[in-house]
Image (tube, grey):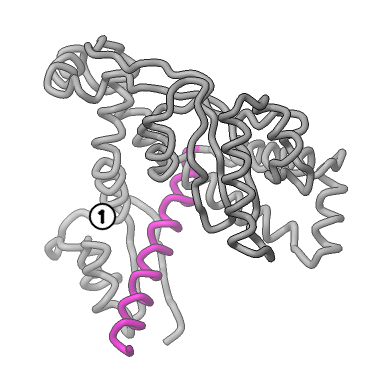
């Protein structure tokens, strides 16, 4: 247990180092005003969702519920800054960095990725099993399926029976149970299996979930394509997604290599290997990490990490 705890502690410290480097880089890139605007936008979105007319009133409501709006803002600010740096310095450069020759070569080698999959439009009736007799809920679901297959209007049956809620309000009376269109690969596996053989206009068997039972009507099907078509942006997105993780790690490694990172001795032996850097031999003589005496001192600010033992 002790070794596991120490390993997790070292990983946490390494994560804090990466976070500090990204925040420092964000300030150097002058992203603070852009990030603050995004924090305000997200806070305002939350206020609107709750029917609150201003950020000030939202913050007052948060304080009434024991939530510190200042701490919430700081958490948002940190996460958005990290995302902004990665997006600007890695993802955007990677996305626009591929040549047309690279794009077409990738497309030819991975045409299966660019086939348009089958999509399905579905409606739903949901019966909650929370606090109810399981057998009774299942029997009710089976009865509704029989009623629908006998010709009952799905929208009317959904409006009368579906218990799906949004902010405590049943949604089916207004929506008629309509959920929307989905590409089959993006559907949850159990839902995809439930509707894959159902014809347009047909109704699925009740699907048991942790919350209750779902009954689906297939409103429409759109067949998938059998031949891939080259689309520059789609290929750029696919290549960026495929290579993004390594590019982000390489970028972070570059930040770590350029920074002066000092970890207290109690944790240095466990943290430096995770960061893939070697400690400064002597801070006073200006030897860079992994360098030789007399080597030119690296540019960059000191990043000190001193967790308590």
Task: Name the magenta segment's main secondary structure.
Answer: helix
Residue 156 position within the rendered picture, expressed as x and y whole percent measured from the top left: 73, 28
State which quadrant residue 292 falls in.
bottom left
For this orientation, the residue located farthest to the bottom is: 2
Q: Which residue lies at the image location 26% right of the left edge and 10% below the top edge?
A: 229
Relative to 224, 72 lies left or right? right
Residue 283 position within the rendered picture, expressed as x and y whole percent measured from the top left: 29, 70
Q: Is residue 113 above or below residue 137?
A: above
State which quadrant residue 198 falls in.
top left
Residue 27 position within the rendered picture, expressed as x and y whole percent measured from the top left: 51, 45
Looking at the figure, which quarter contains the C terminus? bottom left
Q: Which residue lies at the image location 48% right of the left edge and 51% below the top edge?
A: 23
State which quadrant residue 38 falls in.
top right
Relative to 94, 287 lies left or right? left
Residue 240 position within the rendered picture, expressed as x and y whole percent measured from the top left: 29, 31
Q: Which residues are magenta?
A: 1-29
Towards the viewer: 205 or 163: 205
Towards the viewer: 152 or 61: 152
Towards the viewer: 227 or 230: 227
Residue 8 part of the magenta segment: yes
> Pointer 1: what residue?
257
Relative to 27, 140 lies left or right? right
Looking at the figure, which quarter contains the N terminus? bottom left
Mark 1, other Cα within 10 Å: few <14 / some 14–19 / many ≥20: some
């Amino acid at each position: 247990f002790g070794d596991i705890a120490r390993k997790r502690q070292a990983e946490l410290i390494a994560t804090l180092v990466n976070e500090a480097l990204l925040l420092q880089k964000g300030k150097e890139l002058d992203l603070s005003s852009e990030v603050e605007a995004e924090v305000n936008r997200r806070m305002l979105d939350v206020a609107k969702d709750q029917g609150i007319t201003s950020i000030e009133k939202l913050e007052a409501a948060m304080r009434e519920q024991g939530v510190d709006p200042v701490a919430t803002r700081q958490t948002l600010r940190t996460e958005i800054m990290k995302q902004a740096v990665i997006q600007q310095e890695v993802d955007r450069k990677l996305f626009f960095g591929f040549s047309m020759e690279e794009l077409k070569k990738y497309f030819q080698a991975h045409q299966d990725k660019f086939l348009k999959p089958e999509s399905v439009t579905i409606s739903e009736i949901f019966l909650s099993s929370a606090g109810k007799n399981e057998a009774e809920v299942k029997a009710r679901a089976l009865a509704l399926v029989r009623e629908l297959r006998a010709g009952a209007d799905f929208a009317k049956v959904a409006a009368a029976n579906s218990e799906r809620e949004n902010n405590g309000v049943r949604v089916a009376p207004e929506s008629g149970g309509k959920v929307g269109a989905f590409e089959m690969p993006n559907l949850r596996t159990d839902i995809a299996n439930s509707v894959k053989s159902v014809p347009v206009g047909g109704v699925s068997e009740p699907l048991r979930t942790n919350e209750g039972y779902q009954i689906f009507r297939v409103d429409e099907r759109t067949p998938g394509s059998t031949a891939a078509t080259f689309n520059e942006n789609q290929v750029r997105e696919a290549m960026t997604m495929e290579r993004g993780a390594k590019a982000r790690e390489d970028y972070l490694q570059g930040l770590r290599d350029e920074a002066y990172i000092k970890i207290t001795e109690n944790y240095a032996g466990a943290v430096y290997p995770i960061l893939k850097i070697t400690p400064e031999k002597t801070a006073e003589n200006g030897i860079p990490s992994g360098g030789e005496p007399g080597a030119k001192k690296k540019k960059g600010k000191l990043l000190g990490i001193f967790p308590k033992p």
